[in-house]
Image (cartoon, coloured by chain):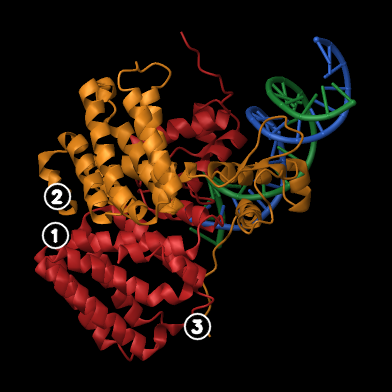
Chain colours: A red, B orange, C blue, D green
Amino acid sequence: MKFEPVTTVRAYERVVEQIEHAVLTGRLAPGTRLPSERELMAQFEVSRSTVREALRVLQAAGVVRSRAGDPRGPEVLPPSPTTLRKSIRRLAQSAHIGLAELLQFRMLLESSAYRLAAHLRTEDQLAQMELALRRMRDHLDTDTTDDGAFSQADVEFHDAVAQATQNPLVVACGEVVRGVAMELIENKLAHADDRRDLREKIVAHHAEMLDAVREGASERAGTLACQALYDYYAEYIPESQRALLAPLL
Amino acid sequence: MKFEPVTTVRAYERVVEQIEHAVLTGRLAPGTRLPSERELMAQFEVSRSTVREALRVLQAAGVVRSRAGDPRGPEVLPPSPTTLRKSIRRLAQSAHIGLAELLQFRMLLESSAYRLAAHLRTEDQLAQMELALRRMRDHLDTDTTDDGAFSQADVEFHDAVAQATQNPLVVACGEVVRGVAMELIENKLAHADDRRDLREKIVAHHAEMLDAVREGASERAGTLACQALYDYYAEYIPESQRALLAPLL
DNA sequence: CACTATTTGTACGTATGTATT
DNA sequence: GAATACATACGTACAAATAGT
């Protein structure tokens, strides 16, 4: 017989466990309200501080949200990749991960996403991508006020591709890595986003990839996506590390 | 001139921000100790509850750990994928992500890992993989007491591959997804791990992949990894969803 | 080894700002 | 606008746990 080492489990952790389990098993659906803090402290038979610490942890985990003065109590949130994003960003910024690794990971994810999309896309999604691409063409010269109609169309295109992959994990990781990478280079990048020729290149790339996705040419779509990322960002990677990226092309 | 909408930011969040920023920028190295709660409440000029709520959030995020009665104060933890694992697990168990998506993601990650390893592996890492494989062969018949010497050798093999990829993000995500997937099927899976024929199949697969990695045949290594995963786990996926996996083979 | 000082964990009371009805 | 219920934040107090003497 073997015994497990015992671990003193804090009161607030037990509270977290119970609530989280209720949410995860669906006994507490998104949108429903938790009892008020005073009610919770009565039900769990703990003090207010304990309840609050538990709620803080759950809030940080994206499970619930509590607003000051809301008489309906803390709200159970729908699952969202926000926490995933924070986790990956933390891991990335912990200096163990550089731009090269990040870009490599992104190339990997995006190429896979396009390969999947080429296989699984519906006519509807294809139409959505075409629409987004047309809108990008229309806004080639629109000024970048109001967050840029061009960028917005770009996002729409990516959303359509994301829908087509049918895998939220791939999509979420891709988005996250994209965001983190952008943050890392945004100082070096002198808002090149509003240079017209760059926009034209982007549109051309997207058009190529859309063709590949339409024809179901998954290999081509994947390599195109990789190549595009490499073309855009390789200049920000030290030459010594570019060898890491080559294997994916 | 445009104004940003203001958002009431809680006191504990400001505390979290400051500490987290200090850790992320390296001003607080892993292993160092934070000031005690009473000290912190003096420095931030907030109450102890506020400090504690902040510490709870940071602890849940895997940034620090505080133990009751430790006069040295909360410990700054080294970056680890534990939180990433929890985030992915939460997202996976929230019913939006099924075993199929998880397996698809894992196939994608592992095949990429092997492709990278085939390109970047050093002789040293190759030797490590060979050693691990030999140990797996040696323990083909060892009983599964003490956590299984066979499984341990298996893990060593994967570690060597992970080292070769040189991308901690790919490795961490792979590990996490592997863990979550295992949890999801572990009820269905009647500890098949100790059936001898399965072990032989695993060894054979590993040997094939090692060959591919040795020869630098990245494409072959990648497809082998995918195929192996599909062979093992496809039976646990509803037939209707297997179409999602096929595009990767 | 026991003791002590310090720190964390928990509890309770109170004041204040806020969202809902 | 008033009333109400709530979350937020502060302060104090005591128990439990830990490290170092």
**Residue B243: image x %, image y %?**
12, 49
Residue to which mark 3 is pinned:
A190
Residue to which mark 1 is pinned: A119
Residue at mark 2 shares a chain with residue at mark 3: no
Query: SS class of the residue under badge 1?
Result: helix
Residue B231: percent from the left, percent from the top? 18, 38
Cα–Cα span, label 2 and label 3:
42 Å
Secondary structure type for disc 2: helix
Q: Are marks 2 and 1 in contact (CB under 8 Å)?
A: yes
Q: Please tell me the numbered disc located at residue A108.
A: none
- The residue located at (36%, 25%) in the rendering is B150
Q: Which chain does the residue under circle 3 lie in?
A: A
Callout 2: few (<14), some (14-19), or many (20+) C-alpha neighbours within 10 Å?
some
Q: Nearer the viewer, residue D10 or B72?
A: B72
Above-or-below relation of A177 to C3: below
Which quarter of the picture shows residue B51? Answer: top right
Q: Amino acid at mark 2?
A: Ala
Foreground: B198 or B183?
A: B198
Q: Tell me which amino acid carries mark 3.
A: Ala
Would you say A59 lies left or right of D12 here?
left
Taking the spot 54% from the left edge, 42% from the top edge, the residue there is B60
A27 or A33, which is in the foreground? A27
Label 2 belongs to which residue?
B246
